[in-house]
Image (cartoon, rainbow, N blue to C red):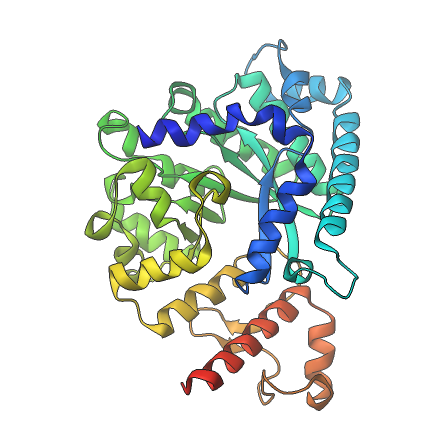
């Protein structure tokens, strides 16, 4: 099945990717730059599985404080330090390959990059917990790592068996590391992949127990217990859903009117368009936007809102440009024009932008919108 082809790819390429992270980063950000994407959060395992190996064989007692102490005593700090070095080397290779700083620099050099430490939900409980500890520790120590996510097929045996336990692990660690951000793949499910009862709680528990600020996929939302109440809760809590339409058709066989995207929009849940895994699906943002237009007849205003949502809900630091992120009313630079030269901006606007990386990225997006709309006479 396409589902199995997708998920089996990762293991088959593990030997190649371990020594070529820099080249992988270069390809991802180069494509982003060519598509006018200004910010990316890439999921990766910079420790090359060291945290999982450290946790293997520990056993799982259910005593999370004791389990964490074991992980600390096994020198998880060394794993984190080595992972940071790996990331340094990979970024140096990426910049070299893209020619950053040269006259012929690739557009990818202008893309802001952050990372999400990925934990693997198909592993044993002791290994999953060790990876989570490593992720929280690394995100606390390295500003490039802005949060963590869980990867691997949500419908596999271990993720289904341990889903609630994984959320409890995140709940415990979130209390110890409250500044570390969490985004979770949840609801990447469809009828037939799992028993009916397996569709009823993943998205809700990810938000209410796992502290997810964003949900990846969210396809099975209408099979959750009290789905309309959940949609209202997501809107009230401003939980963003990452819509990956090509992936959802490929892996789940869900597309068109069967996809919940229109419902998320109807209930005011913020959404953004994503590609899922470009390297496996050979997808890109251009075609994901085109697909959204052709399938759901989305207006330019809706697409524009989705793009803005991406930066509003990104884990990049700094104050937002928007005082109202649903209607996109500016908190600063209210009288300044995004397409104007920097020297013509008001002093308060320049000061605000200098103090916030998020606002600078948002202002750049507004400038890109202004330039594009001027070209097409919008």
- Is residue 180 visible in the rendered structure shown here? no
Q: Which residue is situated farthest in the front direction here? A: 104
**Badge count:** 0
Q: Which residue is situated farthest in the left direction here? A: 257
Place residue 67 in its image quadrant. top right
Residue 264 place in picture, x, y as percent: 31, 56
Rendered-image quadrant of the C terminus = bottom left
Of 321 and 20, the residue lying toward us: 20
Of 114 and 163, the residue lying toward us: 114
Rendered-image quadrant of the N terminus = top left
Rendered residue at 48%/22% (across/down)? 122
Location of residue 352 with respect to 178 vertically, above or below: below
- Is residue 217 visible in the rendered structure shown here? yes
Rendered residue at 56%/61% (across/down)? 34
Judge left or right: residue 263 versus residue 121: left
Rendered residue at 51%/24% (across/down)? 12
Location of residue 164 with respect to 158 vertically, above or below: below
Of 33 and 318, the residue lying toward us: 33
Residue 341 place in picture, x, y as percent: 68, 86
Judge left or right: residue 87 versus residue 129: right
Residue 176 place in picture, x, y as percent: 65, 36
Location of residue 323 with respect to 100 vertically, above or below: below
Rendered residue at 69%/89% (across/down)? 346
């Amino acid at each position: 099945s396409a589902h199995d082809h997708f998920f089996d790819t990762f293991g088959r390429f593990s030997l190649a990717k371990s020594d070529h992270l820099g080249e992988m980063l270069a390809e991802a950000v180069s494509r982003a730059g060519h598509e006018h994407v200004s910010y990316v959060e890439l999921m990766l395992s910079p420790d090359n599985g060291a945290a999982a190996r450290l946790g293997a064989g520990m056993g799982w007692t259910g005593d999370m404080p004791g389990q964490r102490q074991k992980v600390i005593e096994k020198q998880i700090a060394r794993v984190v330090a080595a992972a940071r070095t790996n990331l340094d080397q990979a970024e140096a290779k990426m910049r070299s390959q893209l020619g950053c700083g040269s006259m012929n620099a690739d557009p990818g050099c202008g893309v802001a990059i952050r990372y999400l430490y990925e934990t693997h939900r198909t592993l044993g409980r002791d290994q999953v917990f060790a990876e989570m500890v490593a992720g929280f520790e690394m995100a606390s120590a390295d500003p490039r790592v802005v949060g963590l996510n869980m990867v691997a097929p949500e419908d596999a045996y271990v993720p289904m068996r341990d889903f609630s336990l994984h959320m409890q692990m995140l709940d415990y660690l979130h209390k110890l590391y409250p500044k570390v951000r969490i985004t979770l793949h949840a609801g990447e499910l469809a009828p037939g992949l799992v028993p009916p009862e397996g569709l009823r709680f993943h998205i809700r528990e990810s938000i209410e127990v796992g502290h997810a600020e964003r949900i990846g996929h969210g396809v099975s939302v209408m099979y959750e217990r009290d789905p309309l109440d959940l949609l209202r809760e997501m809107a009230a809590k401003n939980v963003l859903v990452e819509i990956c339409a090509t992936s959802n058709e490929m892996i789940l066989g869900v597309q068109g009117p069967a996809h919940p995207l229109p419902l998320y929009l109807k209930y005011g849940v913020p959404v953004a368009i994503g590609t899922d895994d470009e390297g496996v699906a050979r997808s890109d943002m251009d075609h994901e936007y085109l697909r959204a237009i052709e399938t759901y007849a989305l207006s330019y205003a809706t697409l524009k809102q989705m793009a803005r949502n991406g930066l509003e809900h990104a884990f990049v630091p700094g104050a937002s440009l928007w005082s109202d992120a649903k209607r996109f009313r500016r908190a600063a630079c209210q009288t300044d024009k995004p397409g104007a030269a920097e020297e013509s901006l008001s002093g308060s606007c320049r000061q605000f932008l200098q103090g916030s990386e998020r606002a600078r990225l948002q202002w750049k997006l507004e400038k890109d919108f202004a330039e594009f709309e001027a070209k097409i006479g919008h």
